[in-house]
Image (tube, helix red, strand yellow):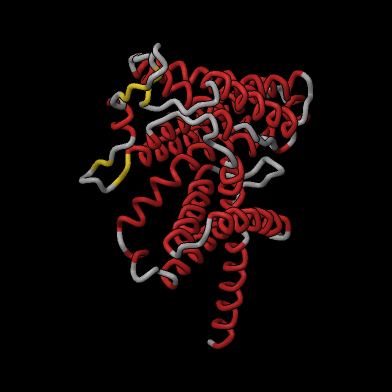
Amino acid sequence: MQLKQTKFSKNLILDLMRISKLPVARALAALCFVIVLGMIFNADGAFFKWDTHRDMLRHISVFGILACGMTLVIITAGIDLSVGSILGLTAVLFSLFTIHLGWPPFFAVLICLAAGLSCGFTSGFVIDRFKVQPFIATLAMMVFARGIAKWVSGGQKISTAVLQTDGTYQYVEAPPVFNLINSKIFHENIAVVTLIFLGSILICWLVLSKLRWGRHIYAVGGNEEASRLSGIPVTATKLLVYGASGFFCAVAGICQAAQELQGDPEAGMTYELTAIAIVVIGGTNLLGGTGGIGLTFIGAMTIGYLEKILSINAVGEASRLMLTGVIIVGAVMFQKYRK
């Protein structure tokens, strides 16, 4: 009897060790650790209020949408540094079309999505056709997109203050679409932008789990040359992946403009840092070939709760940014030595 109990204990320990090596187990452990920190440093009970969690979800949603596209890119062993700049560009375009030009929201959204797709496709084309490193190609797109945003806006925020021909400003009401995207539903318990984030997660899950394109993404990230020799359309896969990243950037830019009631050409600065942190902390390997959108969702919750805990405890923004950088390095080292 004692021998059986000893054998059972050893098997249990071995099973727990195997489970601990799974990326999802590590991601959940990190999330649980952050939640426990929130329960300890609860800012006089603020952490236990639903409003805190609702606002956290609303705040992290824009970053989470960016991380959806970043996940697809990183699984292919790439990187996209332009996500923040494309967000800023589409936020400016959406505000310009709807507030200043009075376009119907449907057409404004289509043009913004097309702009995001174009930026992403351009990065993917440069990377595949000219064999430019993703870091360099997307760095160039980051600078280029930011330049377009400043050129289109004249370096000014596109807000409800509309410049008139006589040099004066006239204030107009924000279009209804801004209020719709920025609203809360279900008795103000959840923000619309959070639902958009969850919809983005669902789309990526369907792509990676149910479509052939998803298998191609993993194959290209695992071994690009072997994928090419196997007949997988590597060029099309890369174009679609970076195009999808640009698409999600445009979605995030529209949400950002609606939340701020303006299009700021400086919007999205350093957002790529948070997007990468979300993906890496979730457990998607920067070397490509492994990972998943579920891990990214867990990573988004981890970063969201961490930032909210720091916020309700009045920790400064500078400290938050430094901590995020440390977390990225720690997460990468954790992946490197997890075996």
Q: Is residue 185 toward the left or the right of residue 62 in the image?
A: left
The residue sitting at 23% across, 44% down in the picture is 186
Is residue 107 positioned above or below 319 on the image?
Answer: above
Frontmost residue, 179 versus 306: 179
Q: In this view, does 167 lie to the left or right of 232?
A: left
Q: Is residue 309 above or below residue 109?
A: below
Q: Which residue lies furthest to the left in this view?
A: 187
108 relative to 203, above or below: above
Image location (x, y in percent) of residue 230: 73, 26
Residue at the image position 48 percent from the left and 61 percent from the top:
310
The answer to whether residue 218 shows anywhere in this view is no
Q: Please identify the residue farthest to the top as the structure is shown.
A: 165
- Which is more toward the observer, 103 or 288? 103
Q: Is residue 233 left or right of residue 278?
A: right
In the rendered image, residue 187, in percent from the top left (x then y), is placed at: 20, 46
Q: Which quadrant would residue 125 be assigned to in this image?
A: top right
Q: Find residue 47 and report its horizontal and vertical position in percent.
A: 37, 64
Q: In which quarter of the image is residue 275?
A: top right
Q: Which residue is drawn at 75% across and 31% down?
A: 136
* Residue 197 found in image quarter: top left
Give the x, y percent position of residue 223.
Answer: 74, 35
